[in-house]
Image: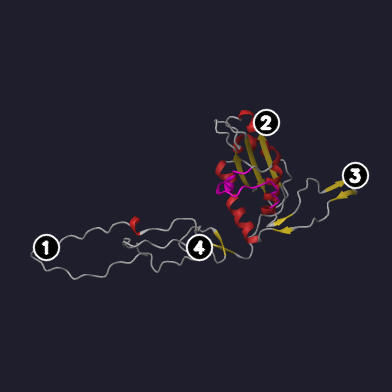
């Protein structure tokens, strides 16, 4: 992905506990934008003189496969609706994410926003190079201050741009009994219910966790299972009813 800064082997690194430069952030998002192929970042593709003759042209760089197209597509699918959730007001589709750091004193030393589409990757960082952010900014989040800067740039880009990403092989749309989101082929193990009737009440045994959940989740224990409700005692005048089959969990 192009991350060269030292990443600590902690779970919190997955949500930003390790320091990463803005350049590395953009390089990593470029890999998503390029469907899993990492190439070195560049700002200039071509230079022409006043007569339209090409003076310099950035030739096709060497690429390194980091992710499969299916994996990169799923990440883009997660990030593509972020702009609508926050009402960014861009004039084109972009996959995006914001982030901040916290100095523990109510300030925000760093705030950033990243966005990409098939044509371009853009990153904006706001902060202070002083240790601990020099006290930090106040309410300077990526979705307000950073967005103000990026919006003017993004909306000023040429309107003729490449089409949005198409679903690649290895990605299936929807999973039975789940939201109609894309999944890696083979990751969805659910099967549709045989009928649309309501599910019976759960029995005392816990249901199995889906196999796609992380293995670090604790498994369900019998002590956490709901206690079955006691049945009503039989009337003294009537003979005890025959025991019927107990419903099994769906």
Image quarter of the C terminus = bottom left
Residues in magenta? 1-18
Question: At 76% across and 51% down in the image, what residue appears?
Answer: 40
Q: Which mark is residue 175?
A: 4
Residue 46 appears left or right of 99: right
* Residue 124 point in image, percent of width and height: 68, 39
Label 2 vs label 4: CA separation?
49 Å
User: Circle 1: is it few (<14), some (14-19), or many (20+) Cα within 10 Å?
Assistant: few
Mark 4 or mark 3, whichever is nearer to me: 4
The numbered mark, 2 or 4, whose residue comes first in the sequence reads 2
The numbered mark, 1 or 4, whose residue comes first in the sequence reads 4
Circles 1, 4 touching at the beta carbon (< 8 Å): no
In front of the other: 89 or 209: 209
Q: Which residue is mark 1?
A: 235
Label 3 vs label 1: CA separation?
100 Å
Residue 185 appears left or right of 204: right
Question: At 61% across and 47% down in the image, what residue appears?
Answer: 8
Label 2 vs label 3: CA separation?
42 Å
Could you tell me which secondary element the residue under label 1 belongs to?
Answer: loop
Q: Which residue is mark 3?
A: 49
The numbered mark, 3 or 1, whose residue comes first in the sequence reads 3
The image shows residue 189, relative to residue 149, as above or below, that is below
Mark 2 or mark 3, whichever is nearer to me: 2
Residue 23 appears left or right of 213: right
Could you tell me which secondary element the residue under label 2 belongs to?
Answer: loop
Q: Quadrant of residue 113?
A: top right
User: Circle 3: is it few (<14), some (14-19), or many (20+) Cα within 10 Å?
Assistant: few
* Residue 132 point in image, percent of width and height: 63, 32
Label 4 vs label 3: CA separation?
54 Å
Label 2 vs label 1: CA separation?
80 Å
Q: Which mark is residue 130?
A: 2
Mark 2 or mark 1, whichever is nearer to me: 2
């Amino acid at each position: 992905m192009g991350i060269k800064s030292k990443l600590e082997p902690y779970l919190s690194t997955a949500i930003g506990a390790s320091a990463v430069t803005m350049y590395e952030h953009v390089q990593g998002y470029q890999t998503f934008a390029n469907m899993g192929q990492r190439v070195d970042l560049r700002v200039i593709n071509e230079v022409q003189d006043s007569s339209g003759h090409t003076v310099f042209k950035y030739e096709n760089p060497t690429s390194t496969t980091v992710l499969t197209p299916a994996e990169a597509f799923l990440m883009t699918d997660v990030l593509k609706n972020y702009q609508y959730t926050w009402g960014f007001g861009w004039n084109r589709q972009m996959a995006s994410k914001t982030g901040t750091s916290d100095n523990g004193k109510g300030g925000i030393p760093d705030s950033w926003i990243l966005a990409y589409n098939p044509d371009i990757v853009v990153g904006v960082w706001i902060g202070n190079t002083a240790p601990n952010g020099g006290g930090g900014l106040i309410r300077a989040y990526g979705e307000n201050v950073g967005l103000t800067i990026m919006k003017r740039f993004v909306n000023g880009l040429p309107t003729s741009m490449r089409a949005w990403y198409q679903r690649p092989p290895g990605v299936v749309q929807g999973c039975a009994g789940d939201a109609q989101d894309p999944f890696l082929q083979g990751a969805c193990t659910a099967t549709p219910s045989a009928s649309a009737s309501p599910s019976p009440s759960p029995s005392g045994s816990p249901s199995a966790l889906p196999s796609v959940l992380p293995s670090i989740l604790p498994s369900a224990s019998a002590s956490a299972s709901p206690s079955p409700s006691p049945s009503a005692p039989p009337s003294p005048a009537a003979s005890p009813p025959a025991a019927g089959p107990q419903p099994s969990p769906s």
